[in-house]
């Protein structure tokens, strides 16, 4: 069923135009998902074509994802609902005052397999998703980072399926760097030096 339903789209998705360049004034969703509304000058793509623009996804994985979740997101009111159904959202276990992260669960093995393959491919790219994987892998480990990227990809898929005019637009490798709050970062560095036993005095730099 999965291969027969989308067998006619092979030639179309193999000749996809390059993804649209990211515009600084592009409206990004509040959840910082790299999705924009395509302008009237952008070429119209099929659903598979729009999903294939996500790093690591490609046409085949896009077809597998659509075969498992469908194209109607009315059954999933929010991307969190879709992530919970797909079991890529780790649950939280609490016993007394101790709280720890639990396993994600089994879920749909075909969908999780496609998302895992896409996340592994995206982690090797020089994109927003690739940089997010590397940031998480340093703090949380490679396995948890890959699950987080799989969930991020699924959230992007939800936005693209929920809005037929939405297109993927990479936020860039330096997205998190530009969002650093200088005052907050300064306080963090001062605290770290004080913990090491240093007395910190700040002198404003000359203009």
Image (cartoon, helix red, strand yellow):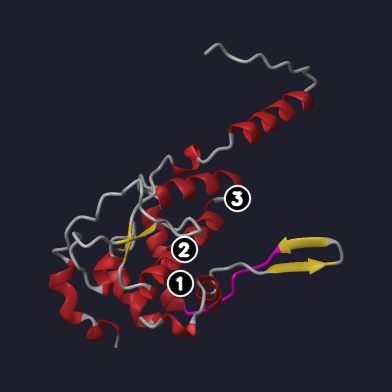
Give the residue at mark 3: 140
Whether residue 96 appears in magenta in the rendering, the answer is: no
The quarter of the displayed image where residue 19 is located: bottom left
Q: Quadrant of residue 28?
A: bottom left
State the SS at label 2. helix
Q: CA distance from mark 2 to mark 1?
A: 8 Å
Q: CA distance from mark 3 to mark 1?
A: 20 Å
The tag on residue 96 is none
What's the distance in space between the residues labelled 3 and 2, CA to CA?
Answer: 15 Å
Inspect the magenta stretch and tell me whether residue 103 lies in it.
Answer: yes
Q: Which residue is mark 1?
A: 112
* Magenta-colored segment: predominant secondary structure: loop
The answer to whether the residue labelled 2 contacts the one labelled 1, judged by CB atoms less than 8 Å apart, is yes
Q: How would you rate the neighbour count of disc 2 (Cα within 10 Å): few for under 14, some for 14-19, many for 20 or more? A: many
Expressed as whole percent of the image width and height from the top left, the position of residue 162 reads 39, 75
In x, y percent, where is residue 24?
35, 45
Q: Is residue 141 left or right of residue 100?
A: left
Q: Residue at x 53, y 69 (%)?
A: 88
Q: Residues in magenta?
A: 101-108
The residue identified by callout 2 is: 150
Task: Answer with mark 2 or mark 1, whichever residue precedes in sequence.
Answer: 1
């Amino acid at each position: 069923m999965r291969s027969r339903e989308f067998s006619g789209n092979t030639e179309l998705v193999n000749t996809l135009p390059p993804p649209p360049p990211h515009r600084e004034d592009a409206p990004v969703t509040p959840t910082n998902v790299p999705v924009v509304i395509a302008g009237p000058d952008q070429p119209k793509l099929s659903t598979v074509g729009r999903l294939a623009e996500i790093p690591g996804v490609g046409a085949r994985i896009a077809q597998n994802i659509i075969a498992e979740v469908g194209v109607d997101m009315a059954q999933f009111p929010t991307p969190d609902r879709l992530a919970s159904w797909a079991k890529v959202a780790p649950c939280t276990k609490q016993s007394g005052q101790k709280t720890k992260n639990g396993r994600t669960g089994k879920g749909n093995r075909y969908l999780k397999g496609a998302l895992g393959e896409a996340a592994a491919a995206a982690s090797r790219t020089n994109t927003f998703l690739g940089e997010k994987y590397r940031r998480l892998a340093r703090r949380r480990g490679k396995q948890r980072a890959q699950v987080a990227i799989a969930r991020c990809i699924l959230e992007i898929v939800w936005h693209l399926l929920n809005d037929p005019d939405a297109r993927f637009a990479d936020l860039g490798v330096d997205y998190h760097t530009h969002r650093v709050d200088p005052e907050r970062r300064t306080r963090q560095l001062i605290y770290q030096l004080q913990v090491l036993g240093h007395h910190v005095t700040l002198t404003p730099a000359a203009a």
